[in-house]
Every structure is written in C-alpha cells, then in structure tokens.
Image (spheres, rainbow, N blue to C red):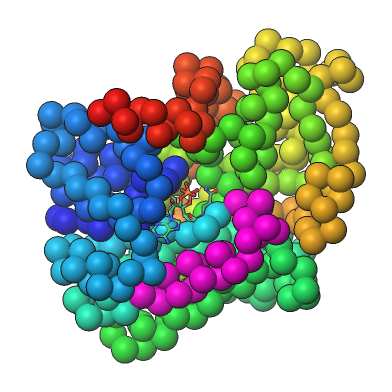
Amino acid sequence: MRVLITGGTGFIGSHLAQAFLERGDSVLVIDTASTAKVLDFRNNPAYAGRFQYVKGSVLDYTLLDGMMRKADLCYHLAAVVGVEHYVDDPFGVLDVNINGTQNVLRAAFHNDTKVVFSSTSEIYGKSTKVPFKEYEERVLGPTSIDRWCYSTSKAAGEHFAFAYAKFGLPVVILRYFNVYGPKLDKIDRGRVLTIFMGQLLRGEPLTIVNEGRQTRAFTYVDDAIRATMACGLVEQAVGGIFNIGTDRETTILELAKVMLKEFGKNPEDPKNIVFKKQEEVYGKSYQDIDRRVPDVTRMKTILNVQPQISLEEGVHKTCEWFKRTENFREPYAAAALEKK
Ligand SMILES: NC(=O)c1ccc[n+]([C@@H]2O[C@H](COP(=O)([O-])OP(=O)(O)OC[C@H]3O[C@@H](n4cnc5c(N)ncnc54)[C@H](O)[C@@H]3O)[C@@H](O)[C@H]2O)c1
C-alpha cells in the first residue's frame, strides 16, 4: 500500500510513517518542517526505496494533487499545533488547518483516495460532560478569545470532511487526546510534557498552572499509532469519528509527580514545584479546560484497539528518550539535517 502522510515529519506523523514502513508499505510525506524526526529511519536500508519526503505545504494544491495521485490512503496530520500558536498566530492556525484541510480533501476527492483526518479533543471545548463521546455537543468560548481558533479550525475541517463524504469520498475522523512519547516536540514548547521536560533537564522546579487539578488522558504514542492505523485499515471505520486516547484520567499535578520521580526528585518536596496563575503563563487570551477525558468505547470495539501502555511506563520511555537526546530542539534538528 502507498500511504501519504501530510505533516509526516511531525511527532505523530513520524511515528505513523515508521509503523507503515515496518508493515512493508511505501510512505510519502509532505511537511514544511525539517526532517529531524525521520532521520533515524530515512536512511534505514530496510526501508530503502519506500520512503519519500517532499518539503512543501498543504496550502499548495498542485503539489498535493500530484502526491495524492500516487497514494492509496492519505493521513492528513499537517496542522499548526500548540498553545503558543493559538494565542500568538491565530491566522496561521485558521489558514493551514482550514484551507490546508480543504485542499487535502479536494485532492483526495479528485484522486479517489481515502482520507483519515486528525482532529482533536479540543473539539469538545469546555463541555463538562466527561467522558467525551464522539457525537455529543461541543461547548466553546467566544471568538474574541483566540485560544478557541484551534478547536474551531479542526471543527471546520471535520465539517469539510463530512461534506466531501456526501460527495462519496471515504473519510475517517480521529480525535487525539494528549498523545505523547519520544520525539514529541522541542523541549519548552506548548505541550505540558515538553515544558516539564525542559525544566527537569535544566534542574529547575516544575511550573504548574493554577493548582494542577486540570485533568487529561495522556496517551502513549504507540497506542495512538495502532488506533490511527486501524482508522485507515478497518473498513467499518469509514464515515465515523473516533476518540483516540486512554480511560485513565490524570491531573497535571500527578503527571508532574510521575515525571519528578523519573528524574530522581522527591515529588513531595515543595521546592520542586512552583504554582503560577494561568494569566501569568498564557496571558488573558487563554481559557483552560478542567477535565478532558475520552470515552474510548468506539476505539475499543470498532477499531479493536486497547490502550496498553501505562502512564508510568510511557513517561519512563519518553524521559529516557529526552535524556538521551537532551538537546532535541530546532538548532539541533537543522544541524542534524545539514550533516546528512
Ligand atoms: N499530539 C497530540 O496530542 C494531538 C492532540 C490533538 C490533535 N492532534 C493532531 O494530530 C496531528 C499531528 O499532531 P502532532 O502532535 O504530531 O503535531 P506536530 O506539530 O508535531 O505535527 C504537525 C506537522 O504539521 C506540519 N505542518 C504545519 N503546517 C504545515 C503545512 N502548511 N503544510 C505541511 N505541513 C505542515 C508541521 O511542520 C508538523 O510537522 C495534528 O493535526 C494535530 O492537530 C495531536
């Protein structure tokens, strides 16, 4: 099978590319970013001739159309992701996530290629009806608060996907819940785990927003990848929406404690954690979500995927990777690319 992955040098995209390569498929990737996350298998002789990377944007329809022509299945993962972007660059978020998605769907329709669209748990917004079920109401804040632009952009993408489905395009929508693992991001970037990671690697205390009682369902990347692959491969998934996550609800404070232990620090020592007000960290244009937990019944029953990696095991694997790759950040990525 020939698989096209937009955003394929990103965190989830690079793991997904590797999983399909391991299965014996051919993988074609389009991304605007550097290839740092795919370097470790790009030159793997076992994958020889089956991996192709094109540096380009999903905003370039002609390029996409040409790549789609060569694909049997498309995973659309390219997106502007990260809290810092929702607040600092709402235009970029809306442009890439809506117009880019529209381009992907149009090219897929033109070439009759199935599309799996990666949406997000952010879709549910401030809904308090946890665990979130795929076909329930969404509750969002006002459009004057920039942080909602990401949720809105992904919802528009889902609507476009369903609109194309009405024309006959096979589409599957998946909504990830806090996927993490090796290669997650540069340290110190917008996701809680990489922010903690940067602080731990420098020996600083962890910064917790408010009291750290907010909850998330941290999903280890290997579990997410098995579910993601199933979305493209299981026939009954077509036309459906799937939460991709775990049942385990974890507070941010609990995550901080698990990570502190991984770095050999006493999680009960008040010197190891600093509590900050949300506005101090994100400014006024941010609203946090108290509880974000998926109902994963559809993932388990239709996709037949059960989460297997516990938070402790996943955090251990992730911390080990970041310790080994301590300087994993953009300058490193660029330098690594130049060396090749
Ligand atoms: N990781 C999570 O927990 C999570 C949660 C919810 C949703 N998602 C979704 O999953 C997908 C992958 O997320 P990720 O965590 O791997 O993030 P990521 O930022 O690592 O991956 C996104 C990739 O898209 C690329 N990209 C951005 N603009 C592009 C453009 N115009 N053209 C081509 N490529 C472009 C980026 O360079 C990046 O490599 C995204 O669509 C994201 O919205 C992820």
Q: Is residue 196 above or below residue 320?
A: below
Q: Quadrant of residue 104?
A: bottom left
170 horizontally vs 273: left or right: left
Q: Is residue 35 above or below residue 121?
A: above
150 horizontally vs 142: left or right: left
Q: Is residue 93 magenta?
A: yes
Can residue 114 be seen from the camera position used here? no
Task: Determine the residue positioned at 32% across, 58% down.
Answer: 56
Foreground residue, 73 or 41? Answer: 41
Q: How many marks?
A: 0
Task: Determine the residue positioned at 30% across, 73% down.
Answer: 61
Task: Determine the residue positioned at 61% across, 72% down.
Answer: 152
Q: What quarter of the picture does the C terminus occupy?
A: top left
Can residue 199 be seen from the camera position used here? yes
Q: Is residue 191 above or below residue 274?
A: below
Q: Is residue 120 above or below residue 33?
A: below
Give the residues in magenta.
Answer: 82-105
Q: Position of residue 339 (x, y in %)?
A: 29, 26
Q: Position of residue 167 (x, y in %)?
A: 31, 89
Foreground residue, 238 or 106? Answer: 106
Foreground residue, 276 or 253? Answer: 276
Foreground residue, 86 or 20? Answer: 86
Q: Is residue 84 magenta?
A: yes
Task: Determine the residue positioned at 25% across, 67% down.
Answer: 63
Q: Residue furthest top?
A: 264
Q: Quadrant of residue 135?
A: bottom right
Q: Position of residue 271 (x, y in %)?
A: 87, 17
Q: Position of residue 77 (x, y in %)?
A: 41, 58
